[in-house]
Image (cartoon, helix red, strand yellow):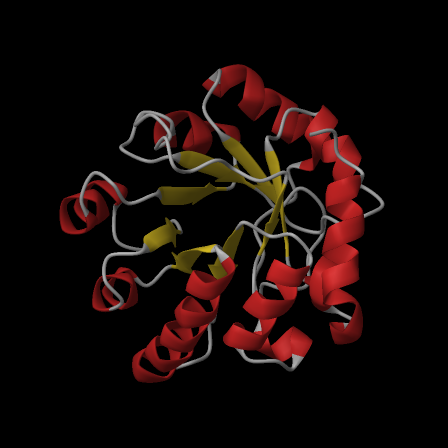
């Protein structure tokens, strides 16, 4: 597994945008996440066309640059390349990490989603910067979610992948995030848990970040 780039550190809370849940553009969400203390934000849009997502991502990247926030593009390596080689998070059915690494270069951060122990063990040998495991709990942000891995799944992946940076995702809220960190995750990725009430996005993130030791 590639070593995490010196300029990239997984934050304890990893916010992910969703225009349908929040009712806000990706740029608006990035601004609110930045106000709440985000240093890294993943842009995720399963419904927009390539051109639509590119336009929104470009606007979000401009906001992020002003706020000192690092942007990770979900799934779309083509959009990441068009934006100037920004970072990507890949799923099981996306471009293979090895191919994405060749296209984006050694300096890009690449994350990869896994849904069981065997997938995570295999992913930890690839040229990526972090492994994501989930869903930890039941989630409504995927139309056809994979089976829940639970806290025990997080523990097993942590034990099997050693010191590899580990992100947990799926059904994580302010009420259960600490348990997920204690199970071995370095970071909790959150969508609904931060976005459901748009007016509370910044305060939700700020309060959650304050609950974790620095």
Q: Residue at x 45, y 35 (%)?
A: 131
The location of residue 41, given as percent across then percent down, is 52, 56
Q: Residue at x 58, y 63 (%)?
A: 142
The location of residue 85, given as percent across then percent down, is 24, 57
> Closest to the observer: 174 or 157?
174
**Which image quadrant for residue 200?**
bottom right
Q: Residue at x 32, y 63 (%)?
A: 76
Vertical arrangement, residue 161 with respect to residue 206, above or below:
above
From this viewpoint, is residue 77 visible?
yes
- In the rendered image, the residue lying farthest to the front is 66
Question: Is 202 positioned to the left or the right of 128 in the image?
Answer: right
> Closest to the observer: 200 or 22?
200
The location of residue 205, given as percent across then percent down, is 72, 54
From this viewpoint, is residue 44 visible?
no
Q: Total number of numbered labels? A: 0
The location of residue 116, given as percent across then percent down, is 52, 35
């Amino acid at each position: 597994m590639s070593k995490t780039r010196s300029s990239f550190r997984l934050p304890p809370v990893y916010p992910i945008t969703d225009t349908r849940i929040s009712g806000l553009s990706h740029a608006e969400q990035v601004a609110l996440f930045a106000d709440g203390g985000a240093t890294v934000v993943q842009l995720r849009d399963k419904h927009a066309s390539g051109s639509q997502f590119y336009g929104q991502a470009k606007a979000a990247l401009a906001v992020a640059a002003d706020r000192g926030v690092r942007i990770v593009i979900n799934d779309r390596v083509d959009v990441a390349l068009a934006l100037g080689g920004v970072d990507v998070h890949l799923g099981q059915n996306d471009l293979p990490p090895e191919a994405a690494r060749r296209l984006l270069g050694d300096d890009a951060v690449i994350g990869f989603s896994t849904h069981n122990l065997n997938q995570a063990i295999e992913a930890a040998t690839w040229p990526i910067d972090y492994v994501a495991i989930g869903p930890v709990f039941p989630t409504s942000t995927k139309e056809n979610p994979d089976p829940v891995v639970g806290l025990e799944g997080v523990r097993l992946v942590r034990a099997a992948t050693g010191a590899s940076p580990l992100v947990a995702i799926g059904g994580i809220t302010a009420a259960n995030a600490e348990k997920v960190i204690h199970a071995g995750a370095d970071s909790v990725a959150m969508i609904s848990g931060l976005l459901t009430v748009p007016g509370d996005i910044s305060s939700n993130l700020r309060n959650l970040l304050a609950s974790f030791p620095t």
